[in-house]
Amino acid sequence: MSSHTLPPAPETVAHMLLETAEAYPDLPAVTFGDTTLTYAEYRQAVLALAAFWRPLVEEGDRVALLLSNSLEMAVGMFAAHALGAQAMPLNPGYTERELEPILADGSPCLLVHERAITTDLEDLCGRHGIVRLVVGQSSPLVQDIAKGQPLPNPEKLPTREMLATLQYTGGTTGISKGVDITHRQLVTNLAQREALLPTKRAGEVMLCSMPLFHVSAVAMCLHLTCYAASHLVILSRYRPDWVLQAIAKHRVTLMSAAPTIFHSLLAYEGFEDAELSSLRYCYSGAAPLPEATLNRWEAASGCVILEGYGMTEAGPVMAFNPIRGMRKVGSVGIAPPGTELQVVSLEDRTRVLPVGETGEIRVRGPHVMAGYRNKPELTREAMADGWLYSGDLGRLDEDGYLFIRGRSSEVINVGGYGVYPREIEQVLLEYPAVSDAAVFGVADSYYGEAVQAYVVLKPGQEFDEQALIGHCRANLVGYKVPNAIRAIDELPKTRVGKLARRQLEPISVPRNRNKPALEAVGSGEHPKS
């Protein structure tokens, strides 16, 4: 248990924005490209967009946001909350194959998307009875509504116990699971993060180059800045020159990023001349941060990286190296106040292991999810006896610091994105020449892990790796596509006929064969900033 004091939490994230706008109406709230909204304008944009959506959205409905990083994404998240609806952020890079089961399960009443989406959303939404709005066409641009006549606060706002977000994450069967997140979970976890990583109220500038459809960017950028009455600078997607330009121009004080971003910035040819003196702290999460990368970054930039750990189902923040107190390099830190972290035996998940022993990490606290949407059996399995079982392996030291030691499940962590082999295997098996397939993760110095695959061909068929990779690209978002595929006569199996995935040998591939997963997220060029 942490000795850090838990600060007060707002009633909900909708209340949080309205209260911050009332207290600091003229402070800059959010910047995207050439446009900066003050908190008064941010509030106005949220309430105006909520009013525009209100005839289509009832309390408890879900609003799907298929958007790249933009003002529309930031404002849309808060607008859904202000309506008492669940925000349902989705990756705009998803293919129709990936969107179909999510939309069927989530049943949003409304889907808002940008014009750049190439998937046939008209047909997809029509099949599921979803109203579709296109930003700038059938839905107004934020810039057009932020300057309007001030609107009154809504007569009714959501309560803490209402569902706030439906966040989809990978599933072991190849079908995504929708994580139901309440307002209580969101605001509790915000206060918990603040206990370990206190901010300067009305004094921070946070840079967000991570995608806002991801739970980490929402918690550590979108919600964090509003909680701290501070300034959020959004990039449409990650690119090293854009990041370094934005830090210098906006005097960024905080940056939250995945390890791949730190690695990429260090490798960028313009990094040595970058102006980084405004940075106070960098936060790292989503995937393990190599100690060598941390040391190189801190030596070159003069800015400390605080590493943390979390998961969609738990806040997401479950642990962080604190600002006030001991930082242990190689550790993801301590649990925040109100959170219980334990390491238990893989054989007997009720047996808590002694300090220093490695086992499965489990967590309990008010920030843990309400459950998986429409999946009561999976919810019961994941949250046995009130504990959420992470599927991650780790150990705790004598000071309560957590050290991650890998995964107990088959999930592949590609730059912070969970990838499940089964989903990719199903895609490979639909290729006419393939009779069997096995997908696995390999260590990668840039991504953390990369996806690879072996296939067994049907008799008389010829192997064409590029055709297979092209088939995957047509059916999967970029970070799920294998960087190498090889043909094999027979897949290794156990005595009972199950795939022996651990016996698959990594495939050697040329360096930088594929673009970094995070750089592939987002569409179009970033507006001038």
Image (spheres, grey):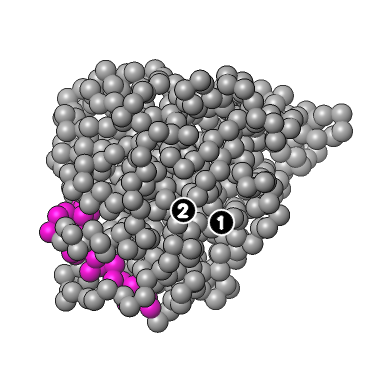
Q: Secondary structure at mark 2?
A: helix
> Between residues 354 and 91, which one lies in front from this camera angle?
354
Between 329 and 119, the one lying in front of the other is 329
Front position in the image: 344 or 233 = 344
Q: Which mark is residue 370?
A: 1
> Is residue 451 in view from this perspective?
no
**Viewed as shown, does residue 369 lie left or right of 325?**
right
Please tell me in which quadrant of the rendered image residue 144 appears: bottom left
At a point 32% along the width and 63% down the height, the residue shown is 15
Mark 2 is surrounded, within 10 Å at the Cα level, by few (under 14), some (14 to 19) or many (20 or more) other residues, namely many
Q: Is residue 132 magenta?
A: no
Which region of the structure is painted magenta?
Answer: 26-54
On the picture, is 328 further left or further right than 404?
Answer: left
Q: Determine which quarter of the picture holds residue 424.
A: top right
Position of residue 199 measured from the top left corner of the image (x, y, whole percent): 26, 41
- Check if residue 30 falls in the magenta segment: yes
Q: Which residue is mark 2?
A: 185
Residue 108 location in percent, x, y?
51, 69
Asked if the residues shown at circle 2 and circle 1 are in contact, with their CB atoms under 8 angstroms apart, the answer is yes
Residue at (28% x, 71% y) in the render: 47
Q: Is residue 450 visible?
A: yes
Q: Is residue 436 left or right of residue 523?
A: right
Q: Which residue appears farthest toward the right when viewing the image? A: 496
The residues tagged by marks 2 and 1 sit, at their Cα atoms, a distance apart of 9 Å
Tell me where residue 466 sits by quadrant. top right
Q: Residue at x 62, y 22 (%)?
A: 354
Residue type at mark 1 is: Ala
How many marks the image carries: the answer is 2
